[in-house]
């Protein structure tokens, strides 16, 4: 079939049964609309790939993260007492349920001066900063939240690491946490300020988080 205007057949919609009286210019160019729509969809897909591609790559690359429980981390020794395990597991359960961690651990480390209650776990985390904030809100829910938070050096494993302070009873505790696309960890430090706690958190993280 040849188009009345001399164009290729099928470019315009035609009613073969009745003459509607429409001029060629009024007919809908279906193929042209389809081509334009396809181009728009392809452009949208390309833009999505530019913005979200790196995140997908990081999430998949960190999906094999494992969390271990070493008995010694520098000067810190793991407390295996029943009381320590009950306390750390209580906090672990609260955080793990709130941020949907897959495999998680609750640990207490001591170095003779500082107690560090550490909760760490794995998950596919699309927005590390938001997930870390949720964990902070959970761990200090009854203490008025974590205040004066600031970003600190996350070390060689990257991601987001942040520290602040919270009040428990009459004492201030330092809260530090990390989050990347494959794991999250939060620790409460007693008798240790933010700068020292941030360094200890990197040390604990490097010993606990492992990527295959």
Image (spheres, grey):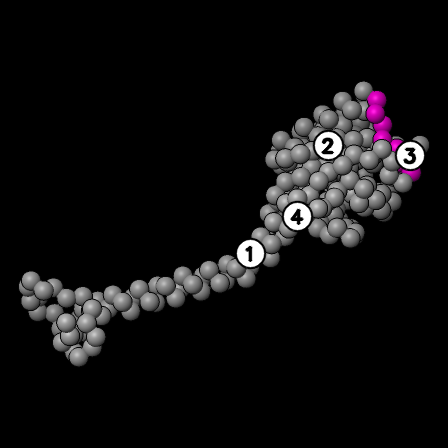
Residue with the mark numbered 3: 111
Where 133 sits versus 36, above or below?
Answer: above
Residue with the mark numbered 1: 52
Q: How many marks?
A: 4
Magenta part of the protein: which range? 75-81
Let me know if residue 99 appears in the view.
Answer: yes
Q: For the residue labelled by badge 4, is the local secondary structure a helix, a strand or a loop?
A: loop
Judged by depth in the image, the label closer to the viewer, 2 or 3, is 2
Circle number at residue 62: 4
Q: Are there few (<14), some (14-19), or many (20+) residues within 10 Å of tag 2?
A: many
Circle number at residue 210: none
Would you say 121 lies left or right of 9 here?
A: right
Residue with the mark numbered 2: 105
Judged by depth in the image, the label closer to the viewer, 3 or 4, is 4
Name the residue: 49% across, 63% down.
46
As drawn, the residue found furthest toward the left would be 18
Work out whether residue 54 or residue 140 is closer to the camera in this orientation and state it: 54
Q: For the residue labelled by badge 2, is the local secondary structure a helix, a strand or a loop?
A: strand
Disc nearer the start of the sequence (3/4): 4
Q: In the rendered image, which quarter is residue 124 located in?
A: top right
Name the residue: 6% across, 67% down.
19
Disc nearer the start of the sequence (4/2): 4
Evaluate if marks 4 and 1 touch, with contact meaning CB atoms under 8 Å apart.
Answer: no
State how far apart marks 4 and 2 are (Cα): 18 Å
Q: Position of residue 120 (x, y in %)?
A: 72, 37
Q: Is residue 80 magenta?
A: yes
Q: In the rendered image, which quarter is residue 66 located in?
A: top right
Would you say 44 lies left or right of 129 here?
A: left
Q: Is residue 17 magenta?
A: no
Evaluate if marks 2 and 1 touch, with contact meaning CB atoms under 8 Å apart.
Answer: no
Q: Position of residue 119 (x, y in %)?
A: 74, 34
């Amino acid at each position: 079939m040849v188009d009345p205007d001399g164009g290729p057949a099928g470019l315009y919609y035609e009613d073969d049964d009745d003459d509607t009286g429409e001029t060629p210019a009024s007919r809908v160019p279906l193929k042209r609309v389809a081509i334009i729509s396809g181009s728009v969809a392809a452009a949208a897909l390309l833009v999505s790939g530019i913005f979200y591609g790196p995140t997908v790559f990081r999430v998949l690359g960190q999906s094999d993260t494992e969390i271990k429980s070493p008995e010694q981390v520098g000067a810190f020794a793991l407390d295996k007492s029943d009381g320590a395990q009950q306390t750390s597991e209580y906090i672990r359960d609260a955080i793990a349920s709130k941020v949907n961690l897959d495999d998680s651990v609750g640990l207490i480390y001591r170095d003779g001066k500082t107690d560090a209650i550490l909760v760490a776990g794995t998950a596919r985390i699309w927005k590390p900063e938001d997930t870390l904030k949720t964990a902070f809100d959970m761990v200090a829910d009854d203490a008025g939240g974590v205040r004066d938070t600031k970003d600190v050096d996350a070390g060689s494993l990257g991601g987001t690491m942040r520290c602040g302070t919270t009040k428990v009873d009459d004492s201030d505790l330092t809260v530090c946490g990390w989050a990347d696309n494959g794991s999250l960890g939060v620790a409460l430090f007693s008798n240790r300020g933010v700068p020292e706690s941030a360094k200890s958190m990197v040390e604990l993280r490097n010993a606990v988080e492992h990527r295959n």
